Amino acid sequence: MLKQLLSISRHKTRLDKSLSETFFEQLAVTYRKYAPADHQPNIEWTFILWNTLGKVVPSIRPKGFKGHPGGPKIRAIATSNYQLFKLADRMVPLVHRLENAPKKRRQTISKITKKAAPKAKLSYYRAQLRLPLDENLAVYASYWESGLASNPKAIYTAAQRLRPNLRGVWVVKPGKVSEVPADVDYVVKNSIAYFRLMARAKYFINNVNFPTEIVKRPGQVYIQTHHGTPLKKMGLQLQNHPVGASGMSFGQLLKRCDRWDYSLSANRYSSEVWEQAYPSFYKTLEVGSPRNDRLVNSTPADRSSLRDSLDIPDGKTAILYAPTFRDWAKGGAQPEVDLDQLSHALGDDYIILVRGHYLRPKSKALGRLASEGAIRDVHSYGPVEDLLIASDVLLTDYSSIMFDFANLKRPIVLYANDWRTYSQVRGVNFDITANPPGVVASTMDQLIQTFLNGTYQDSDATELRTKFTNRFCAFEDGKAAERTVELTM
C-alpha cells in the first residue's frame, strides 16, 4: 500500500505540488492505522546518504540494508517527519542516475566514495554520540573481533538468562561473519551499524581493548574481562621488554584503559598484575574467570559426549598439546615439541590433540603429521573449553591455558626447553618452572619418559598441581559469569 501511495506522490500529474504536505499527513495517519504492531522501519535519515552511495559501493552498506529508494520515505512517514520526506524525495532521482550512469563514471564515483567513506562514518559516529544511550543495549567482542569466545561469551550467555531485556550485539570482523550462529545479533566492524552501536550502547564487554577512537560517554559501562592469568609481562610491564611491546604505544594503551569501569580477576595474583600493568581508575572484581564456569560445572556425561564427538575411544589417553607463541618467531614457526617423535614413542595408547595459539600460524609440518595420523589437528575446532573437558592431560609450555585446565584437577605437563630465553626476552611475572602445576621437562627424552613411566600423574605431580590450583583457582566455583552480570549490569 505504501509503495503504491508513494508512487502516486512522485507523479506531478497525479498530485499537485500544493497538496504535497496534506498528502503526506494523510499518509502518516494511514500508516499509523494499518502498520503491523511489530513493524520497525530500520532506516534513519542518515541512511539516505548510504542508500545513494551503496548503489555504487555496495561494501559500505550497513548489515541488512536493502537499498530501496522508498526506505527513507517510509521512515519519514512512520515518524511524521515532512522535512525528511522532502529530502528523501530529492535524493531518489540521484540514486537512479547513479544506477544508470556509464561504467567509467560509476568507477570514478566508487573511488571517491571509498576514500570518503571512513571520514563519513566517523562523522556519522559523532552525530550518533549526541543521541541518548540505549540502557538495554550491550556490545560484546573477543580477541580483536574474532567471534564469540572466552570470557565475553560466558558473560553474554549469563546475561541472556539473568537480564532478558538486555540486547547483546557482537562485533565481528568481515572474515568471521560466516562463523556467527544464526540466532546471534551482530554488526561488522567499521560498518555504519557498528558506529551506531558503539555510540548508543550502555555496556561494553571485551577481553582486549576496543579501538582508541571509540569515545567513552558518561553513563557507559566498560567491562574488561582479560583472557587468562598473566604468566608473562603485560601492559606497562613491557616497557623494558621491547619484543613483547613491539608496535605498542603506552600512551594510547593508558588512554584505552582509562575507559574501563571494571577489570575482572581470576585470582588475587592476577589482580596485582593487572593493577601494575594497567594502572587506572577501574574497580577490580575478583569474581573468577567466566569462561571457566563451563569447566567447573562440567559433568562426566559432558566429558563422555565430547570424547565421542572427537572420536576418542575408551581406554585411550588424550593429550592436549596447547603451546603459547614466541613473539620473536616469524612465519610458520615449528612447535617446540617434536610431535612426530612423541607420537611414535607413546604409541597407540595415546592420542595427541594439537591446538596452536590463535596468534601463531599453522605450520606445514603439522598438516603433514595430521594427514599421517600421528596427531589430531584441532586448530579449527570450536570452543577450546570442549577440548579441555575431553582431554586427560594438558601438555603446554608457558600458555595461560594451564591456569584454566587446573580447574579440572587433571595432570599438567610443561615442556620448558627454552624457558631461559622466553623469560628474559618476553618477560614473565614469576618462574613457572620453580612453581609448576606438574612435571617439568626440558628435553624430548625427559618428556617421553614422563609419560612412559607415569610420573606425569604420580603423587609428586599431584601435590604440585594441588598447590597450583589452590593459588590460582580459589575463586572458581562455576558462578563467575553470573557474579559479573549481577555486579556490573
Image: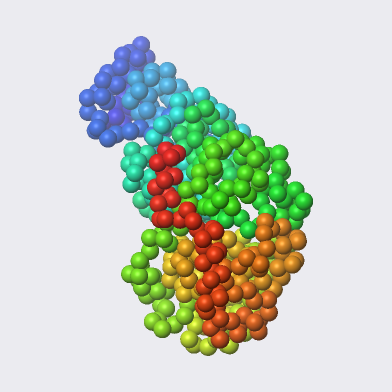
Q: The N terminus appears in which quarter of the rendering?
A: top left
Q: Residue 103: x and y, percent?
A: 57, 43
* Residue 29 appears left or right of 76: left
Residue occupying the point 75% across, 66% down: 421
- Which residue lies most toward the top here? 18
Q: Compare residues 261 and 250 and report the one nearer the observer.
A: 261
Q: Is residue 224 visible?
A: yes
Q: Residue 178: x and y, percent?
A: 45, 56
Tell me where residue 88 sits by quadrant: top left
Q: Compare residues 316 and 25 and report the one nearer the observer.
A: 316
Residue occupying the point 29% across, 26% down: 5
Q: Residue 303: x and y, percent?
A: 38, 70
Q: Compare residues 212 and 454 and report the one nearer the observer.
A: 454
Tell me where residue 39 sits by quadrant: top left
Question: Is residue 451 shown above or below 238?
Answer: below
Q: Compare residues 465 and 415 and report the one nearer the observer.
A: 465
Q: The C terminus appears in which quarter of the rendering?
A: top left
Q: Total marks drawn? A: 0
